Image (spheres, rainbow, N blue to C red):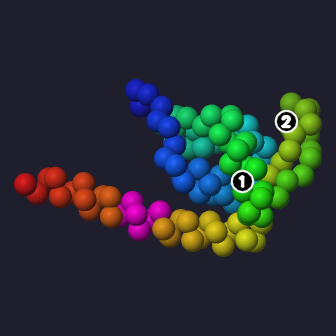
Amino acid sequence: MPESKSEILQGTLDLMVLQTLEAMGPQHGYRIARRIEQISEDALQVNQGTIYLCLVRLLQKKWIKAEWGTSENNRKARFYSITNAGRKQLAAEAENWQRVSGAISRLLALSGQR
């Protein structure tokens, strides 16, 4: 288990939220944040304010949509789901992430070659 939680890199939260919704179907914001933390084995910390700002941004871009429903503890909650435009964006962002993370991995490997 990691010693401390890391802040999420700028620009990656959209990707993680879209992937979570694609994998899990409609979810409310709290559940999305907890799922990201769970999948990261608590290495990432998702601030509640940050997740809701992200959800508003994704709604404005029409990459997700929202509907009111009832949460597992019988509370009114807004459930978010990915749209077709969001799926296209997810594919583009995932491809970009693979390219960038591969480049960073290659750079880090250079330090072992000295």
Q: Which of the two labelled residues, at mark 2 and mark 1, occupies the earlier sequence position?
A: 1
Residue 52 in sight: yes
Q: Residue at x 79, y 43 (%)?
A: 28
Task: Single out the residue that lies furthest toward the top.
Answer: 3
Q: Position of residue 54 (x, y in %)?
A: 68, 48
- Taking the magenta stretch, the answer to whether it contains residue 101 is yes
Which residue is the site of mark 1? 57
Q: Position of residue 29 (x, y in %)?
A: 75, 42
- Which of the pair 60/29 is nearer the observer? 60
- What segment carries the magenta color? 97-102
Q: Residue at x 40, y 63 (%)?
A: 100
Q: Residue at x 70, y 44 (%)?
A: 53
Q: Residue at x 54, y 53 (%)?
A: 12
Quarter holding the C terminus is: bottom left
Which type of secondary structure does the marked residue at label 1 adopt?
Answer: helix
User: Is 100 rendered above or below residue 57?
Assistant: below
Q: Does residue 27 appear to the left or right of 23 in the view shown?
A: right
- Which of the pair 78/9 is nearer the observer? 9
What kind of residue is marked 2?
Glu
What kind of residue is marked 1?
Arg
Q: Does residue 44 appear to the left or right of 72 in the view shown?
A: left
Which labelled disc corresponds to residue 97? none
Quarter holding the N terminus is: top left
Q: CA distance from mark 2 to mark 1?
A: 25 Å
Task: Single out the residue that lies furthest toward the left.
Answer: 114
Q: Position of residue 103 (x, y in %)?
A: 33, 64
Kindly indicate the quadrant of the structure image that contains residue 105.
bottom left
Kindly indicate the quadrant of the structure image that contains residue 83.
bottom right
All told, the count of numbered labels is: 2
Q: Position of residue 91 (x, y in %)?
A: 59, 70
Crowdedness near tag 1: few (<14), some (14–19) or many (≥20) residues, C-alpha within 10 Å: some
Which residue is the site of mark 2? 72
